[in-house]
C-alpha cells in the first residue's frame, strides 16, 4: 500500500517498543535554575557576591561617618543587627540600602542619648565631660 496513492488507507503509526532499552537512561525532569522566582522552596542566597560588595560599601560609609562618635564596634554591631532583620527575605535587592538606613537611625539614636554618670546626673548640655 502506497500512502501517496489516493484511496489507500494511511500507514499505521509505529507502535511503541514493548521492550525498553536497558542502556537508555530515564529522562530526568530539568532542575529549576537557582533563584527561580517560580520555585517557592528556592530562597535567594543571602550572601551573594553583589550583596556582599554592597554591604562592604555600606560598612565603609558608616565607619567613615560614625566611628569617631560611636566607635567601630558599635558601627559593626548596628549594621549586623540591621542586616539580619532581613534574614529569610526573598527579595534581596534593597537589603543593603535598607540595612544602611536602619543602622544610621540606630547610630543616631545611640549618640543622641545623653551620657549619665554613675550617680545618675546628666550634664546640662547633655554631653559627657570633656566632649
Image (tube, rainbow, N blue to C red):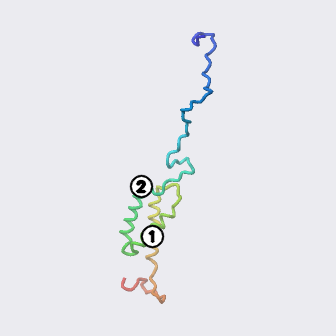
Residue lying farthest to the front in this orientation: 22
How many numbered discs? 2
Helix, strand or loop status at disc 1: helix
Front residue (pair 96, 28): 28
Q: Which mark is residue 49?
A: 2
Where is mark 1, residue-wise? 77
With respect to residue 3, does 93 lie above or below? below
For the point 45% across and 81% down, which residue is it?
114
Front residue (pair 57, 21): 21
Residue 3 at what x, y percent from top left?
A: 58, 13
Front residue (pair 76, 103): 76
Quarter-of-image position of residue 18: top right
Q: Which mark is residue 29?
A: none
Alpha-carbon distance for marks 2 and 1? 21 Å
Q: Residues within 10 Å of mark 1 (few under 14, many from 20)?
A: few
Give the quadrant of the N terminus: top right
Residue 22 at what x, y percent from top left?
A: 56, 32
Helix, strand or loop status at disc 2: helix
Residue 26 at what x, y percent from top left?
A: 56, 36
Marks 2 & 1, CB-CB < 8 Å contact: no
Q: Residues within 10 Å of mark 2 (few under 14, many from 20)?
A: few
For the point 46% across and 88% down, which residue is it?
118
Residue lying farthest to the bottom in this orientation: 119
Q: Report the side of 57 relative to 24 (left or right).
A: left
Give the quadrant of the C terminus: bottom left
Residue 122 at what x, y percent from top left?
A: 46, 86
For the point 60% across and 26% down, which residue is it?
17
Q: Earlier in the sequence, mark 2 or mark 1?
A: 2
Amino acid at each position: 500500500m502506497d500512502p501517496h496513492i489516493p484511496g489507500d488507507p494511511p500507514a499505521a503509526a509505529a507502535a511503541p517498543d514493548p521492550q525498553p532499552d536497558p542502556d537508555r537512561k530515564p529522562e530526568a525532569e530539568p532542575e529549576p535554575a537557582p533563584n527561580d522566582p517560580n520555585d517557592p522552596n528556592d530562597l535567594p542566597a543571602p550572601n551573594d557576591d553583589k550583596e556582599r560588595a554592597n554591604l562592604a560599601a555600606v560598612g565603609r560609609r558608616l565607619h567613615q561617618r560614625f566611628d569617631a562618635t560611636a566607635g567601630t564596634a558599635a558601627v559593626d554591631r548596628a549594621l549586623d543587627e540591621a542586616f539580619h532583620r532581613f534574614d529569610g527575605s526573598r527579595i534581596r535587592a534593597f537589603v543593603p540600602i535598607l540595612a544602611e538606613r536602619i543602622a544610621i537611625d540606630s547610630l543616631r539614636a545611640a549618640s543622641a542619648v545623653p551620657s549619665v554618670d554613675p550617680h545618675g546626673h546628666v550634664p546640662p548640655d547633655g554631653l559627657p565631660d570633656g566632649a
